[in-house]
């Protein structure tokens, strides 16, 4: 009888060792029994930052799809390797000879991977690059170019998007490719006029000329929001429009990706120079096109002007606040520029960044065996991470990283800012939680920090393969997080 009582007591105390509070396993079990959670996968860990003590865990070693929570891994690595004061340079230069204002050569735009050139997220300063370039060109004395404006995006390869992305993302604004040169967030706005029962009429794009042809299969209907897709491959100058769009709109706007940002930038600058009465004799081109045609030559170039991006601290903050896929992918590729390729090793720009990222965290003492990524943004559904790894990274960044302040500041406050401005709003944790969210089809995730009773906790929570709408799943996760604290 005594042995039986001891066994019962030990059994009852197991949840305390697992969670730090005996109600947590019950709350998680109740969460998984809710309608819509049938067959779903939940992974969770809560860890006290100062001492590393795990106060709650559930399937924290399980590999799950993180969606945009993966951006925390990318931005933390970028801060660690590049430093928060790093700025991307973009240089305007020329080759050939300059006599009496006539350039017998080409004008080059040399990129370093900056994803913020002309970005709406850093306006109006980010929009001033063209004025700066033209002024510097005029001060150099160039009044005519008997060559071409050439975009040199060769710092990265031509694999702008991850091969692991799904088809519906290709052509979308959030699936824009990351290249050695980017412009205007690599997105355009497509304006349409809609009438019920009729195919929407295409008005135009802003900026103009980014896509040569749209194949329009849209349908106008009496709906409140659109369910549209802009589909198309990188570098292809045509796009396909599918789905349903609200009727009765004089001007309705969709967003898509610029198919070839480097080439478009060269064309954009060419047109601007002509408006300033600086004629350019040859059509705009870029490294990719010249290299494919065997015409790429890299000789001596003379610098006209170099402009710089915002600091990495600012870029990382914007990446995590608005969940900017392009920024995150560019950061991963920039990290990869420091990777030392081994003999016989052939890696893409994505691949180099991934290798260096993993090496960095392995040297920092984190277990990377369950970390699998194919981009920096988390847009690939094949990206995998464990809640345990994410909590380890969060604790490291808060206690050991020399860039901890920049990283902590990059996380939006739940219920107030960024992609989590409505999450936990009005709850007991509002004003105490700083979280990065992630979502895609049947995937939700949150990771970051929560302060409670004078202590800071790292939390990583992932839900995959749920069977309800996104709204109910989000609200259920908010209630679960509240219950854990």
Image: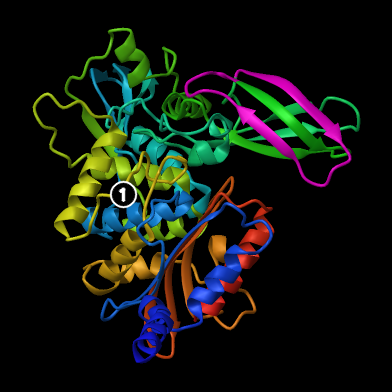
Magenta span contains residue 182: no
Q: How far across and down, in percent of the image, does residue 428 sit?
A: 58, 83
Q: Is residue 448 visible?
A: yes
Instruction: Name the side, left or right, on which 212 lies relative to 163.
Output: right
Instruction: Name the side, left or right, on which 104 lies relative to 183.
Output: left
Q: Residue furthest front?
A: 1
Q: Quadrant of the N terminus?
A: bottom left
User: Considering only vertical position in the picture, is 310 above or below 188?
Assistant: below
Magenta span contains residue 227: yes
Q: How far across and down, in percent of the image, does residue 181 sit?
A: 38, 34
Taking the spot 29% from the left edge, 72% from the top edge, the residue there is 398
The quarter of the displayed image where residue 313 is located: bottom left
The quarter of the displayed image where residue 227 is located: top right
Q: Nearer the viewer, residue 450 or 262?
A: 450
Q: Residue furthest left?
A: 343
Which residue matches tag 1?
Answer: 371
Taking the spot 29% from the left edge, 20% from the top edge, the residue there is 100
Give the magenta-colored segment's residue range: 212-238
Q: How is the image coloured?
A: rainbow
Taking the spot 89% from the left edge, 40% from the top edge, the residue there is 222
Q: Residues within 10 Å of mark 1 (few under 14, many from 20)?
A: some
Q: How far across and down, in percent of the image, does residue 149 sit?
A: 38, 22
Q: Nearer the viewer, residue 213 or 24?
A: 24
Q: Is residue 124 visible?
A: no
Secondary structure of the residue carrying tag 1 is: loop
User: Considering only vertical position in the picture, is 243 above or below 386?
Assistant: above
User: Considering only vertical position in the picture, is 380 above or below 400?
Assistant: above
The quarter of the displayed image where residue 214 is located: top right
Q: How far across and down, in percent of the image, does residue 288 sit?
A: 35, 19
Taking the spot 68% from the left edge, 53% from the top edge, the residue there is 468
Instruction: Name the side, left or right, on which 429 lies relative to 434.
Output: right
Q: Nearer the viewer, residue 259 or 437?
A: 437
């Amino acid at each position: 009888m005594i042995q039986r009582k001891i066994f019962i007591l030990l059994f009852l105390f197991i949840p305390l060792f697992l969670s730090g509070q005996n109600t947590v396993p019950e709350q998680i079990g109740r969460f998984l029994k809710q309608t819509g959670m049938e067959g779903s996968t939940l992974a969770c860990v809560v860890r006290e930052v100062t001492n590393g003590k795990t106060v709650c865990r559930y399937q924290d070693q399980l590999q799950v799809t993180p969606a945009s929570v993966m951006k925390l891994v990318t931005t933390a690595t970028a801060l660690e390797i590049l430093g928060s004061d790093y700025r991307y340079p973009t240089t305007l230069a020329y080759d050939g000879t300059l006599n009496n204002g006539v350039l017998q050569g080409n004008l080059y735009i040399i990129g370093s991977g900056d994803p913020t050139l002309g970005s709406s997220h850093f306006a109006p300063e980010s929009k001033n690059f063209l004025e700066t370039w033209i002024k510097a060109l005029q001060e150099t004395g160039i009044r005519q170019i008997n060559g071409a404006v050439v975009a040199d995006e060769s710092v990265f390869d031509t694999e702008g998007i991850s091969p692991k992305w799904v088809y519906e993302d290709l052509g979308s604004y959030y699936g824009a490719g990351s290249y050695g040169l980017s412009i205007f967030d690599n997105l355009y706005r497509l304006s349409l006029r809609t009438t019920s029962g009729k195919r929407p009429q295409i008005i135009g794009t802003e900026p103009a000329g980014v896509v040569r042809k749209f194949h329009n299969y849209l349908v106008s209907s009496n709906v409140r929001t659109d369910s549209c897709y802009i589909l198309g491959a990188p570098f292809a100058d045509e796009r396909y429009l599918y789905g349903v769009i609200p009727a009765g709109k004089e001007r309705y706007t969709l967003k898509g990706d610029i198919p070839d940002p480097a080439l478009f930038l060269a064309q954009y600058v060419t047109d601007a120079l002509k408006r300033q009465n600086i004629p350019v004799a040859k059509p705009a081109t870029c490294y990719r096109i010249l290299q494919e045609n065997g015409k790429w030559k890299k000789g001596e170039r003379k610098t006209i002007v170099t402009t710089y991006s915002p600091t990495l601290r600012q870029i990382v903050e914007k990446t995590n606040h608005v969940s900017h896929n392009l920024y995150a992918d560019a950061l991963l590729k920039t990290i990869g520029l420091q990777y030392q390729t081994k003999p016989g090793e052939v890696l893409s720009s994505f691949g180099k960044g991934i290798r260096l990222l993993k090496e960095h965290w392995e040297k920092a003492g984190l277990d990377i065996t369950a970390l699998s990524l194919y981009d920096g943004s988390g847009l690939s559904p094949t990206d995998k991470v464990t809640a345990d790894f994410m909590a380890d990274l969060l604790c490291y960044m808060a206690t050991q990283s020399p860039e901890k302040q920049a990283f902590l500041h990059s996380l939006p406050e739940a219920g107030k800012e960024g992609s989590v401005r409505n999450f936990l709003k009005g709850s007991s944790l509002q004003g105490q939680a700083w979280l990065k969210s992630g979502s895609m089809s049947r995937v939700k995730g949150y990771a970051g920090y929560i302060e409670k009773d004078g202590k800071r906790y790292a939390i990583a929570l992932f839900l995959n393969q749920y069977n309800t709408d996104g709204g109910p799943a989000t609200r259920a996760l908010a209630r679960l997080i509240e219950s854990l604290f």
